[in-house]
Amino acid sequence: MTVLLVTGASSGIGAAIARLAARQRFDLVITARRIERLESICGECEPFGVQVLPIQADLAVGEQVRDVAQRALEHFGKIDILINNAGFGRINWLEALDSEEEIAAQIQVNLIAAIQLTRYLLPSMIERKQGYIINIASIASLIATPTYSVYAASKFGLHGFTEALRREIAIYGIHVSGVYPGGVETEFGEKAGIKRKTRIKTPDWMRLTADRVAQETLQLIRRPRRQVILPSYLSLVVWLNRFSPALVDWMLQRWFVARERAGN
């Protein structure tokens, strides 16, 4: 059987990936902080005849990242597919963010944990000369917008890690891909502490479902690609940001920053 490990599996995209992977007959390692949610996901996955190992872990703690890798390898003997999905955001002006709880923790969970977990699992993939590492990033990995400074920093870092790692280990037959979704209907917005005077937000018609992201992610296993931007039309926005950054700066300053900062 093929073994898939997904982080941040208690809700949102991670939970959707776990459910879909079980239907596709992957054995699973699922990890998150909320053990009761993981056990619930297990109950949904096991009827498909797969083995599921739930591991409670806080990826903000480096020792627990190592523990996830060790327990997964001890239980299954291998991990074929690693999906680094865990992440969170605290969205606000930089000067309003707490240095430890909101800045350091974002970098640790969104970037360092993904790097370390990959590092722990990579030697066994290299030894077997096969494996797949998929990093669930964000459109914020490619376009940095106001109030997303630290979140974007962590996700830009994840994009750079994905690109460099792909070039490092392709020689061993190991695939590495990045998934870059725009707004997704998950708990992210509820926990990010977003406050808008202008009430600007991603329109409902543009928001992706977690199931859509899960489908696109697992399709990579059958047809590997370097990256997937979701929805695909956001590639045009990425292009605009890359080749006309002055225009994007002006638009964001006029239509967002000036209005949000008014009165401060």
Image (tube, rainbow, N blue to C red):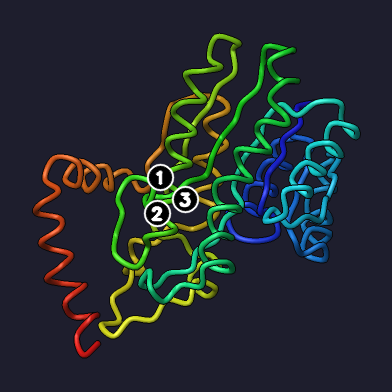
Q: In terms of secondary structure, where does tag 2 sit?
A: helix
Q: Which residue matches tag 3?
A: 154
**Along the horizontal axis of the image, is 88 left or right of 52?**
left
How far apart in space, not on screen, are marks 1 and 3 (Cα)? 6 Å
Q: Residue at x 42, y 33 (%)?
A: 227
Q: Are marks 2 and 3 in contact (CB under 8 Å)?
A: yes
Q: Residue at x 57, y 36 (%)?
A: 218
* Amino acid type, residue under disc 3 in the picture: Ser
Quarter of the image for residue 133 reads top right
Which residue in the rendered view is the most extreme toward the right?
Answer: 75
Quadrant in the picture for residue 81 = top right
Q: How far is the residue under mark 2 from the one under mark 1?
A: 6 Å
Task: Name the residue at 41% across, 37% down.
Answer: 228
The residue pinned by badge 2 equals 152
Tag 2 near tag 1, CB within 8 Å: yes
Please give the residue where the numbered disc 1 appears in the rendered image: 156
